[in-house]
Amino acid sequence: MAHSQNQELEYMVDEYYDTTDFDDSTFADESPRSTDVDDSLDSDFEDDFEVSKSKTDTSAVEARNGKDIQGIPWERLNFTRDKYREMRLKQYKNYENLPRSREDLEKECKEVGKGHSFYDFQFNTRLVKSTIVHFQLRNLLWSTSKHDVYLMQNYSVMHWSSLLRRGKEVLNVAKPLVPTMKYPGSVSQTLSRVQISTLAVRDGLMAAGGFQGELICKYLHHPEVAFSTKISNEENAITNAVDICYSPIGSMRIITANNDQQVRVFDAKNFACTSRYTFPWSVNNTSVSPDGKLLAVLGDSPECLIADGQSGKVVSNLKGHLDYSFASSWHPNGTILATGNQDTTCRLWDIRNTSQSIAVLRGRMGAIRAIKFTSDGRFMAMAEPADFVHIFDTQSDYGACQEIDLFGEIAGISFSPDTEALFIGVADRTYGSLLEFNRKRCHHYLDYVL
């Protein structure tokens, strides 16, 4: 993956609402930016936010009455939202590691019916706002219930309660992190000023990867960090992805993917590294099949690999993408794998026959940097680097799609475990926020009663 960071991409209007025009930086592309991180990003949040800030939020009722879901004051600007969208689509430049012709790719892409509505806008808050440390890594937001979301904001992991409309800092990685769980032979060590590059939360455990090859593990119910260490000391050792999963026998594991070409498996009980597998290129993403037996490995190669989850031995080679891949997700049935690539497509693979992908889905303007399935397998969401999240109905053979259109860098997407909510983290200096959508239900019997 590229070595540069993208600390802050500014796409939106200036902080003042009386701005008369956008400046050149408004049309920033997905190119790498400076690696410097401002010391002023240190945070020490109070449990409660200022009530006065609530005026920046947007509710479903306000949106139905015409307010922009992100609170952008289009009426005060010199152009309409539609005009700005048109300009963005024309001027946005997608980042490519392997520039290649896309002509044949266009022919492969599935024709999809858009305009569907599977999830309705519910709420947008600017009281918490996502930040990104590397422009190619966007797994920085996780939902553990329809009321609980965890996201990265500068040097803080924040918890947002959509029920209480309140944010709280659960981990500050600018301060020294002293691991509290130390086992014989443990490689745990104290860390500080960690730049979180990737995040995963599952079953009460949070795992975070760092820009210098760090791994941090914390139980949500405990105030201290359970485990922290540098898993690689190479110069370019960024932890690109972490995954919390279960082995075939039911033991919890943490899997990391790093730029040093290695995938490491940690036992979540004692945080010992039990396995490490080496691949021929930097590993940007891994995901484990629902039964724990297979491991998808994606990285600085157009090819994606399927490896045995216990031995790391490659059992399948998926060919079709044209550039580097950064996202993957398994359908709950365990037979379909989705991979996201910088060639602006998501490919769907049936692992029972991997000779070619079964479908190719395309975004609007950029790489596919995040993919998530609902726990019931009904929907799949894929996010571009900025502006667009696409939700596909799997029961229509991915032929029906809802397109969520917004402005700003997308730091992460997450369905709630019960499938009732979809959260989107938006990174922007002014309009950074957390968007919440609720699953659309047809309760016709209520109309009858009323």
Image: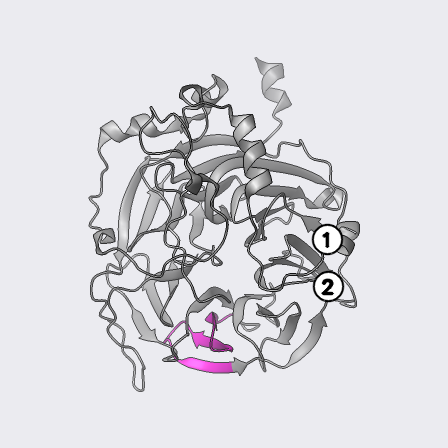
Q: Secondary structure at mark 1?
A: strand
The span from disc 2 to disc 1 (Cα, nearest Å) is 9 Å
Is residue 169 located in the magenta-colored stretch of the structure?
no
Mark 1 Cα within 10 Å, few/some/many (few <14, many 20+)?
A: many
Question: Which quarter shows the C terminus?
Answer: top right
Residue 87 to residue 222: above or below: above
Pinpoint residue 293: horizontal percent, then vertical percent: 61, 72
* Left or right of 88 in this view: 44: left
* Left or right of 186 in this view: 397: right
Pinpoint residue 21: horizontal percent, then vertical percent: 41, 28
Q: Amino acid at mark 1?
A: Val
Task: Give the residue at x 27% y 46%.
Answer: 168
Q: Which residue is mark 1?
A: 360
Residue 337 to residue 153: above or below: below
Is residue 265 located in the magenta-colored stretch of the structure?
yes
Task: Give the residue at x 65% y 67%.
Answer: 302
Please, which residue is most extreme toward the bottom here? 185
Mark 2 Cα within 10 Å, few/some/many (few <14, many 20+)?
A: some
Task: Give the residue at x 54% y 54%.
Answer: 369
Majority SS type along the magenta span:
strand
User: In the figure, residue 161 lies in which quadrant?
Assistant: top left
Colour pattern: one colour
Q: Give the magenta range.
A: 250-276
Q: Secondary structure at mark 2?
A: loop
Residue 320, labelled with which disc? 2
Q: Is residue 450 visible?
A: yes
Mark 2 vs 1: CB contact within 8 A:
yes
Pinpoint residue 443: horizontal percent, then vertical percent: 61, 25
Residue 351, labelled with which disc? none
